[in-house]
Every structure is written in C-alpha cells, then in structure tokens.
Amino acid sequence: MDEIQRKLALIDKELAGGRELHKQLTSTSPLLFAATGLIIGILIQNTFFGPPSVDGGSGLVWLWLMLPVFCAAGAFIFFLFRRDAPEPEITAYMALVCFLGLGAIRLSSFYQPEANDVRNFVADEQKLATIRGLIVTEPYINENRQWRFARFRYMDPASSFYLEADEVKTVDGWAKVSGRIRVQVNEPVLDLKAGDYVEMYCLLNKFNKATNPGQFDISRYLARNNVFIAASVKSRDGIKLLENRHRGIFTKIKRKVSKTAAEALLAGALPEDPDQGLLQALLLGYRRNIDDDTYKAFGKTGLLHFISLSGMHLGILVGIVWWLCKTTGLMKRARSIICIITIGVFLLIVPPRAPTLRAAIIGLVFCVSFLVRRHSNSLNTLSLAAIILLLIQPTQLFDAGWQLSFATVVGILAFTEKIENFLHERTNYWFLNIELGETNILRRLTKRAGKAVTSLFSVGFAAWLGGAGILLYHFYTITPLSSVWTVLVFPLVASILAFGYLKITIFFLLPTAASALGVVVTWLADLLIWIVECIANLGISQILIGHVPLTLVILYYCIISFAVFVHLRRPLPKKIICDVTILLLIVFLGVTKWQRTHRGGLVLTCLDVGHGQAILAQLPGKFNVLFDAGSLDRSDVGRRIVTPFLNYIGTGRIDAIIISHNDIDHINGIPEIAGHCKVKSVYANDAFFMAVEADPCETAGTLKRSLSKQGLEHLGEDLNLGSKAKIRILWPSEQICRDEKLSDNEKSVVSLIEFSGSTILLCSDIEKFGQRELLRLNPNLKADIVVVPHHGSAKTLAPDFLKKLDAKILMCSCSRNDQKSNRIIKPTSKVKWLCTAEHGAVAVCIEKDGMIR
C-alpha cells in the first residue's frame, strides 16, 4: 500500500506542475523571494555600478530607495483591478523587489569609504608612515612549512595581523584616520595580542593584483573584506606598545573557550602529528595545522567538505545532545533550550565562517520552533540564514566557500527526495519493505543497511549536484565519485565527531576517560587519512578540466533545475530536452579537455614570478615542458603561481622540467610542482640531484619518485618528446660545464624551440661571455622570439647580441623593482616588448601555419 501511495503522490506532483510548486513556495517559503531579491540587488550593484576600488555607486541610492515606493504603487493598482489576486504571491514578489533595492544599497554602503579612510592616504606608490591603531586579530606566525625552500631563507618567520587604524602622523601632527590594515612584520611578534593599542613605523602600500591566470587574487579577496592597504614593518622594534585596551567580554569568553577546547582536544597527543591537524580541522575548524598531503588527498577525492565545518558537523553534535536529552526523559522544550546552549558554545569555539554560521542559524530556528510550537520550513530557514549573512557582509556572495555552502544545501533540499525515490523505484522498494514479522535477522539488517546507504548516497549526490558547477568554475575540477566516497567514509567521520566532542566535553571531569577516548579518536583519524589517501592514489576521483566560462555553469544549473522542477504534460519532450542538453554539456567539456591536452599549435607562457623564471612550453600534441620555476622576491611560486596556472589550463602532467642552472631564483618552486603534477623527467646537473637525494624531507621523496634522472650530458641532444616541435640545447658544451672558472650563470642552459618555421630562444642567465660564444658557435643563429638573458639585465648584455638574433618579439621575466630602478634594457620600437613586470604573465602562440600571435 505504501508503494501505491508514493506513486500516486508523485503523479499528483507531476500533474500539478510548476504552478503548484510556485504556490507552495510563495505560501511556505516567502523568505526565498526576499533572499533572491537581495542576491540580485548585490549582483546588479557590483556588476554595473560599484567595483570595490571606486565609489560604490552611492549616487544611485535614491533610485534603489524608490523601488519600494514603485512596488507598493504597482501592488495597489493590481489589487484595485484584480481583487481576487493571490495575496501571498503579491507579497512575495513585493519582498523580492524591496530586497533587491536593499541589496544594492547595502553593497554600496559597505564599499563606501569614510572621508578620512586610510586608503585615501596612500597613493599608488609606497609610502613611509607612522600610524597608530588597535590590533583586532591575534598575530599569526607564518612559518610557511609547506614550502621546502623556506628553511634556506635566512630570516625569521613573518607575523601578520589586522590593525584598526586610528591616527597617522603628518607634518601638522596626528590626524584621525579610519579603516583596516593588514600588517606584516618580518619576524615573530609573540608578545603582541588582540586588544593592544600600538604605534608602528611602517611602509604602506596597496595590494598587487593577481598577474597570472589561476593565481589567487589576494587584492580582490581583501577588498571584499574592506581591506585595501598593507603595512610592512621591518622588525618588532618598529612597533611600540602604547596600551592594552581591554577587549569586550564576548571576545574574552570566545578566546578562553576556544583555547580550552583546543587544549582538551590535544591533551595527550603531539600537535605536529598529521592526525591531530585533521582532528583540529574536523572538530574545531582550524585548518592551518592540517598536513599538506592530507589536504591534497581530501581535495582530490572531493571530500574537502568533511574538513570544513558545516551543517553536518553541527548536526551530528546537536543530534547527539538531543538524543542524550531524550534518553534522560527531557521534553522537547527542554531539549531545545539545551541544544540552543550547545550551539552557542559551538560558535564560541569555532571560527565564524559562512557554513558554520549558516548551520547555526538553521539549528537555532529549528530549536526555537519547538519553543513557540511552530513548524519550521527548511528552505525558509536557509533563506533567512542567507539574508542575515549577506546583510552583515554582502561581499560574501562572491566567495567560493559561501557559494558552495549554500549551493550544496539547496541541492540537498531540492534533489535528495527525488534521487532517493528514483533509487528505490529501481530496486522495486526492496529496502523499504521491512515486514514486522520478518524472522531472518540477516535479511532485516541488509535492508536497513541498504536503506541507510541509499539515503546517504542520495544526500551526497544531491549535494554534489548542487555544488558541481561552482566547484568547476572556481577550482577547475569535477569529482563525480565524491558521493560514493562520502558513503564510504561517513561512518568514520561521524564516529570521530561523536567521540571527539565527547572527549572535549568530559576532559575536565573525567581526564582518564578522555585520554582513552583520545586514543580511539586518534586511531580513527589515522584510519580515515589512510583510506582517503588510498582513494586519492587510485587517480580516478578527480577530472581536471581547467577554466570554463560562466555561461556554461549557468547553463548547467538551468538544466538540472528544468529537469527537477519543470513538469510537462508529455514526458517525452522533457526527456529529449534534458538528454540532449546534458549530452551537449558533456561533449563540450570533453572537447575542451581534449583541445587543452592535444594541441595543434605551440604555446609558450612566461609566468610573472618577479625576479626569477618559470616558462611553460605547451608543444603540439600533448607534451608540456617547463623551463625552471623559481623566484627571489616571491615565496612558494610552485604552489601559489605555477600549479594554479596548470590547473587553470587543465594540465596535470609535465613531460620534462629543464633546469637551466642551480640559482635559487630558477629552482625553488620545483619540489611543489613535482608533488602536484605527474613529472616524467627532470634535466639538471649533478649538483641538483645530489641536493635532492640528500634531503630527508617528505617533499624531496615525492620529487625523487616523480622524476627520471637526466644529467647535463644529455642536454646536448634533441629532446625526443614525440612532438612536431623540436627542442635543441645550444649551450653549454661538456667542456664549458667542466670549466670551474666560469660562473653558474655563464653555464646556464640555452634552449632553442623550433616549430613550423618559427624559432624561440630561451637564453636563461648567460652573460656577456656566454652570449658571444653562443653566437660564435652558431653564426647563423636567428630567432623570432627571444627570452632576454639574465632577466633583461642591461649590465650583463653583450653589445649587438639581440640585434644579431633579429628577433620580432622580446620577452623578459623580471621584477617591478628591476624595472623601476632601470636595471633592465630599453627595447627599440622595432620589436614587440613583453615584460612580466609590466604585463604580468605573457603568452606567445605559434599556429600550424607559422603565424605568431
């Protein structure tokens, strides 16, 4: 009988169609329309009127304020002629229009600076200043442990914190200023803390925008948090502590509670252990100490949501508390009060991120509904959470984390029931038909387990459907098997959360029992890490696509919305539309991936790494060659610049890395690249390989496993990469390599790439001697494109070297300081000059017919 009722209910929904759904939404979820209007208003204001760097469109505020007036007038006229009009629908759309204006006004006011804002004090150039202000965040020591070469930098780890500016010193004395500043001190500041009022002698400047495709844009990110100015302090001596202003009682309580929870969790364990870093991320939301390899494994398997505090974590905690209260015989109102207190304590412990706050708001509304004896609507509650968070900080709308948080929950609410019904229908409702008189225990357990797995898979797949488009747009990958892995590891995660929170709760009352629970939790965390890393090593979880246009993502969400919510009288047309559109989407992604891995032409990209070099040659076919990867003035370029660029272009494989020489600005990003990509071979001299083999670090082990050792003796030959393009090594010869009188720069590798009648010469760091000898040994050497020697240094450039090469395009990889101090050459008007300091990352493409663009 249950099956018949389910099918009849499903038929009724399909017959009712979109009109019934629309009526249901307007009557039960009116806040959905308000949230939609708020989002549309923020998007319109940001897109057309208010970039973060300028006036936020404050002159249009009057226009947005007029919207409610026009809306009310329109509603009055509508009701005047249509007295039978449905009131909930009119109210819902009035709320949409009113909140549209509110969203635009809120974003405008959020970006609107004060007249004395500190950003008005700093122009485009750096400025020395003495400034006073209040430290508003606890100083963070950036040890940069993920970067292997960090330990070779002869300086202490830097500290960073945020400062609420108060006064700045001028020629006329101290002047009042406002605004928040991001401060970096070039050494640890262990004696400073939030609440200290300080005076700093510092260098103020604006943040540089991202200059490489795929690179995280720290300037845009901080601008969305209303932080536009950076302050650099040379040492702790440049900061003078004036007074300690007592922080608010709430801040003190939050710090004390979070510190106590961390101590309880780490009691009896070593904080450096990988499992402890995972436990801090799972239970407390602090991801800074999580091991890099563990983080990568969770990312590759699509399970990162487990180590980002969300509704699942809070739901498990509240569920445990609710069950314990129910077991003790408490009524629903008492349980609700205790759960509200639990949510409050949870918010004191964890960082205030969007997923956590969203889950807390939903949990609080759920508990309050029992106190006031009202039924809560999930979609309405989710909309309320979105409205609250966006009114507090409207720019959260543009953060990938915020988008994923809400998109996955919307996916769960919209698709879970339909997916679960579909699966049960395909299994003929076998898992649901549990008869009361069933005597076969194994059969009953199998059905219950199957029902639980089906429900869990449905939730996981629905969440994946909701977040897949956003994940692809921001992170360039899709993880179609993540819902399967979710089913596999969820019992472990739930057990860790249950035992972990229990350990924290009873630590001060029963320390021995807490220690025993700590052993169990640590063992479960180790098992979880092992399972996730094994899944990641299979290499089947993640498909790297690369950057896709926003229109494709919008089309994806239109397709799944049409498939789920639009009901046609005849199912065949809908099925054809959905199947054809999904097929076209898959074909587009497949063709995009194929074109990016199987090219007809050659693309050479010189990334902007400051004073250093990282050049990727994408040869015809599917072969990729990286020439060096390092920098003097930018840290961790392998992880922060090169690998994001490889993800952006959809490439996870490098066939060869050619290391020109062992200078730090050419090699200090390579270990992180080898740990991220599949690297077939590395060409370098023996000194490089000796350093790698002597390195005891885990990352060095990754590099050893990733490369096939090729010494400089092989560089005199053409690299056989099976491509239509050829790479010839013109310099140095074996005799030059053995000459101990010559510097490493003079011995650096010079490569010539030939394709379709065009040539590219990569000169590395050869100086005057090497340049003259190169022309002597190759008297007929010409090149269409030349990467200028030694980062464009005018001091080490031989006269007429570039003129004899007769290049059409000159490329230079140098820093902005090199350019400003006039240390680089000044090109003539006869050649095209491409400089990373001026243009950011530059790319040159050679087509099949030899055309260069």
Image: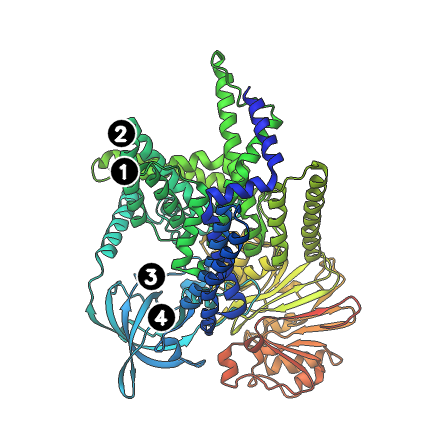
Query: Is the residue under label 2 in contact with that under label 1 (CB below 8 Å)?
Result: yes
Q: Position of residue 58 (x, y in %)?
A: 44, 72
Q: How many marks?
A: 4
Q: Secondary structure at mark 4?
A: strand
Could you tell me the amino acid type at mark 1?
A: Ile
Could you tell me the amino acid type at mark 3?
A: Tyr
Q: Position of residue 669 (x, y in %)?
A: 51, 63
Q: Describe the colour scheme in one phrase.
A: rainbow
User: Looking at the image, which residue is at 79% across and 71% down?
Assistant: 757
> Which class describes the residues within 10 Å of circle 1: few (<14), some (14-19), or many (20+)?
some
- Nearer to us of marks 4 and 3 is 4
Residue 667 appears in the picture as rendered: no
Looking at the image, is mark 1 or mark 2 earlier in the sequence? 2
Q: Residue 330 bears which disc, if any?
A: 2
Query: Is the residue under label 2 in contact with that under label 3 (CB below 8 Å)?
Result: no
User: Looking at the image, which residue is at 35% across and 49% down?
Assistant: 272
Give the residue number, with chain letter if any, for mark 4.
Answer: 181
Query: Is the residue under label 3 in contact with that under label 4 (CB below 8 Å)?
Result: no
Q: CA distance from mark 4 to mark 1?
A: 40 Å
Looking at the image, is mark 4 or mark 2 earlier in the sequence? 4
> Which class describes the residues within 10 Å of circle 4: few (<14), some (14-19), or many (20+)?
many
Give the residue number, with chain letter if any, for mark 1.
Answer: 338
Q: Secondary structure at mark 3?
A: strand
